[in-house]
Image (spheres, coloured by chain):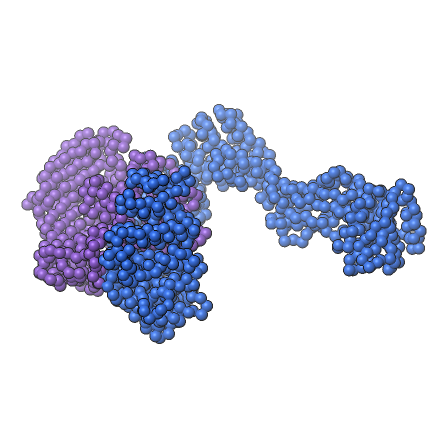
Chain colours: A purple, B blue
Amino acid sequence: MAQRAVWLIRHEPGNPLGGTVKFSRRYPTVEKRAKVFNGKSYVPVPEDGPFLKALLFQLRLLDDDKDFVERRDSCSHINKSSIYGLLVGGEELWPVVAFLRNDMIYASVPLVEQTLSPRPSLISISGVSQGLELLFGIQDFLYSSQKNDTDLNTKLSQLPDLLLQACPLGTLLDANLQNSLNSINFSSVTQPQKQPAWKVGTYKGKPQISISITEKVKCMQYGKQDIADTWQVVGTVACKCDLEGIMPNVTISLNLPTNGSPLQDFIVHPCVTSLDSAILTSSSIDTMDDSAFSGPYKFPFTPPLESFNLCHYTSQVPVPPILGSYNMKEEEAQLKITVNLKLHESVKNNFEICEAHIPFYNRGPVTHVEYKVSFGQLEVFREKSLLVWIIGQKFPKSMEISLSGTLTFGVKGHNKQPFDHICIGNTAYVKLHFRISDYTLTGCYADQHSVQVFASGKPKISAYRKLISSDYYIWNSKAPAPVTYASLLP
Amino acid sequence: MGPLSREAWAQRLGAFRASPSAFLAGAEGEDLGRDLLSDLRSEKLSEQTKVSLLTLSLEYSDKLWSDAPAAEAAATSLLDTLVLLPSKPSALRRLLLLAATTALVSGGALGPTSGASCRLLPLLLGLASGRDMGRSFGTLSEQRHLQATACECLGELERCKPGLLAGSLGILRSLLGQTGPIQPVSLLLALVLHNTLVVPSRPGAEIGAGLQGLLVAGVSSSGSCPWDWTLAEEWDAHLQPQAPSWPTTGEEHGFPLLKPSPEEARELKAAVAQLLDTSYLLTSVAQAQLLWLLGWALRGLRGQPPVVFKPQLVRLLGTAQLTLLHSVLALKAAFGEALFTAQDEALLLRRLTLVAQHPALPSPTHLFYLNCILSFPENCPLGLEGEEAAPLLLGPQLSRGLMPSLLHDPMVLLARLHLLCLLCADAEEEEKGHVHSPRWYLQELLAGLQQRAALDGGPQALATLCFQASYLVASCLAGQPTVRTSLVHGLAQLYRARPSLAPHFVDLLDQVSPELREPLRVVLQQEVVARPGKNESLCWHLRMLAKVAEGDAQRATLSFLQAAAIHCTDWGLQQALLRVCRALLRTGGGDGLADLLQVLARQLEDADGRDHARLYYILFSHLSSSKLGMALGPSLAVPALASSLVAENQGFASTLMVQETPAPIQLSVGPQKAKGTLPVLHLQVEALEAPVYSLELRFRVAGQLYGPLEAVHIPCLCPGQPAHPLCLTLQPRRPAPARLHVEALYTTPAGLTCHAHLHPLSVKFADLFLPFPQLPKGSELCFFDDLWNSCLPKGVESRMWCPLGPQGLEALVSQHLEPFVVVAQPPTTYLIAVQLPPDSMLLLRLEKAQVDGVPVALRTDNWAVLPLVGDYLRSLAAH
């Protein structure tokens, strides 16, 4: 259960090498063990240069992606996980854990404590999950509360010291690098016994707890008889507990109003000390009925110092917040579109923003538009072949609005207009972007009075709620649309 | 040279990091390790620079000090530096401990004879147990912080030499209840406990027997050394995986089964419970490590029910933390039903399917959990061990959320598609025709993928995805006719829409099983030949045809090629066209192929093309179809990097030319039978590995001592059959021994003609001996005397001493000279006459044998053989 090496690589499309190694760390003692464990199948960890090249090739991030290359494109080279085999110096280095986020490639080579041929299954290699956890930890550290490139560079420069704390000899001790940073800063304080390793130092000051619930709603509306619309709410409860004492105990309850939609599919932070079996087993896999557990959902925990996600959940609300329809037809050289949107009466009609984006892919620039909107205003981005319908803060009293229009397109310029591999022919969508504060679609709220705190002093408790759209699509009902299996079930 | 400045070091370290091997090979390479160690003590360098030096040594100690003596010296120097540090707090102490540990381990210096090891171990143990180590290790509070580091270093030593710290179990256990950081001590204790139980103990299982003693021994009471090199010796043999193999539950293979006594079991249980009870104080990755270690440690113990883990599970099942859930799966694999009832198993699988798709988790996490589902350690597994399969409990309801969709990114799509294929393969055929069955959905999905891949100018990745999906489906479901038909149909449509995907098609045809390959090949051939004439896809069509042109539809193919020939104006197209012809030649041609080749040989603009066409025509009209297939088949010696032409020429060369090979047969000289008028060499021939056909053996005598030898022909030799006897008649020009050079020319089972040099054969002097014809009874002595007298004066007489071995004269004669004896009066006299072809003779009179030899009078009419006779007589005793 250890890592042989870790890399952080910035992907730079213009760079002839395709990227630069921003950080790398090797563990010679682990490498020594790898040599013994892997025996004849041992392949040494390469230097940064060859590793970079092999990884970028495997991830298809080099610019020469035009032709068929058997080593990468052969139908039998199937990658079904973020674990790769890299060809370096004629030998295959495996397993390499790697993924790309925000132009950064995170990679590590976990130790496999047995021979590599035949290849052991991933589930039997403890270093794989550890490697992923370490890389996620680095990613969280780099991008949490990071505002610009200077911030990023500062954090990058802290990485060597942090890894010396979190993973000094290749075996990961803590994936939370912020915690490691704190431990460097707190190093002059002697820790008492029973101090959890995930909480360095203690909070001193006014006790306060903040709980914020963010729900994201995803939706696919097809406007078709034989395909069912699907939607889902995904909630995240983030907490920051500033409480004195080594191990304060807190219990937070999530409540639903009487007509609220039951919460399901809970996953909780490891600091939650116990979990009611009704919470553990409430699952979207089961068909819904009235017997579904509808709270209150209690989470007893001992909070870490920093802000953390107490739990995530999903929920199936009875109707999507905005119902829409989208018709797009090609008539001679023109596209005729109509979009209708209706806000459900139960939804709070007070948006921070509400926009409908109507993109046109695989076509030329928009040369001519005629349109009529019943409400709001339309912005036309001709070169990007995009219409943005700005609806504003409120739907009108009728709750219904519509847009109709006719568009003509010019000749497709090379690489100027957006390409999409889903929107072929008349397959097209409207994507809604909206945000409503102090509101949740499920009705879920954290009751401030039911928060129990076993610590000195009565904390100030603040609670926030927010609803955000995420992947909210309304597909053209006059053309085929990508379906999920769930939307085909009777 | 004095210490380098901060900037110089920064530059040097940068250059090293850019390419350590290049730097070490360079001029400064040798000095780096030494300079680094000495500059660590320099007072001019800042602590920050020293930190960067130590960080580098942590990362590259195996490169800087690669052998044991260098590593030992480096570790000693690092420890000296540590002792010399001023007593004020310093970040260097921690790094120096880590660096010394790393240097010793990675350089292979760790051991009982290493002075540095013997300094480091007590130091680490002292720091780990919270003893005051004196002012040179900083203030007491700083020493407290080094406690964690010391534990980590000890852990690393124990990992690399399992069993090293078995004697410290008691100390570590007592530390767990005291002040100090809980995580490092817990992890170290769990690791040592694991190694003590899992590392195969020496005969007698002393560890198991002394477990209780080890667990309760305190610092003061034990008195014995807390580390033990004997346990850790032969570290390569002892280094055992934490999970040697991911076994199916219930099996105990490969594990040493220890049977602790009741007292030991109680003590062990208490220790494990103590570790688990405080495990919530550990970070989640450390908790996961603890669970792996304790799980695999207890697995090998009889009578240790794993219920002790149960209280942890409910807490852990609620999280989606990768390492934690993974460790739960490890516990599942380790204990199976003993820890997870059927309901527990169902719940675990439900949680696993949930986290494999939970929208709040990132895609690498989803993919890892999806992979875990396919290798889920079931209580009652049905399939083969190690094979990916959907768990039995994963019914349609549970897997509904794991269905692929076109909106997924390629890896998620492929992983989910694989699951879907496995489910479809398991599903009964009866659901056929059900509109919304998984199989129907699968086909819809493939159609969508094909449509996307058909997009003109679309990225390569989309095409690759489509073909990988097709391959997955083909490898799981090729046996199902409905799936196969729709797949073939869809792919044919895809080719029609975008012929430039031909390389992908060729690759797919190479990879899939014949069940799919054959129908797909036929359909693609039809697709291509249905579109004759000029178009921009001609090069792709030709490339495709070169792969799929075989079988019955040759007429259509030929007319397609005839039509295409007019448009093949450039070299590339002509070559592509010829490649198709070549493919046709290989599979037997067809009626019109000769005509087409003749036309091409005249018409093609390019001279190279015409030459090739002519060559193919000549080959076609002169070689039998099987030989043609061989000649044009894949070259046996395909070079790694070669143009098609090189490969092609190699193919010809290997078939039409004689190949030089190692000897395919073994030739040996058998026992000789002296009779007749010419000496005959009795040979034995055996095939070595493969059958050999039409073997021709050619012999050549060095020095023209004998007349030319005729070649010998053998139709067939197979390995394993009895040796084939062979008589080779020699025609000596002089009575002298010789070496025969032998060459073999033969045909392999693959039809290639090969040539090999065999080991030369030796013809000995005695091999040439022939007896005189049988004489009438009574005239022998007279005949011999006549011969004896006739030798002189032309010839020569000599007397020699023939040494006798223990067997005596009679045995010697009967063994070697029997056929040539004319008169025998044992034990006193033997008269021996030997004909030496072509026209010489040798006469021997063996007289009364003495103690160790026999005097021999000899005459011959050819004085040149005298030295040979001498050698021969002397050699007799040796046999």
Quadrant, the N terminus of chain B: top left
Residue in the picture at 19% in, 52% down: A234
Q: Is residue B243 above or below residue B217?
A: above
- Furthest toward the left, the residue is A397
Q: Residue at x 24, y 63 (%)?
A: B179
> What is the quadrant of residue B464 in the picture?
top left
Q: Is residue A89 visible?
A: yes
In the image, A412 versus A41, the foreground residue is A41
Query: Is residue B580 found left or right of A2 in the rendered image?
Result: right
Q: Is residue B825 left or right of residue B278?
A: right
Question: Residue A278: x percent and y percent?
Answer: 20, 64
Q: Tell me if I can see residue B18 in this picture.
A: no
Quarter placement of the C terminus of chain B: bottom right
Task: Report the residue at 27% width, 48% height from top.
Answer: A161
Q: Residue A301 appears in which quarter of the rendering? A: bottom left
Residue at 13% over, 56% down:
A204
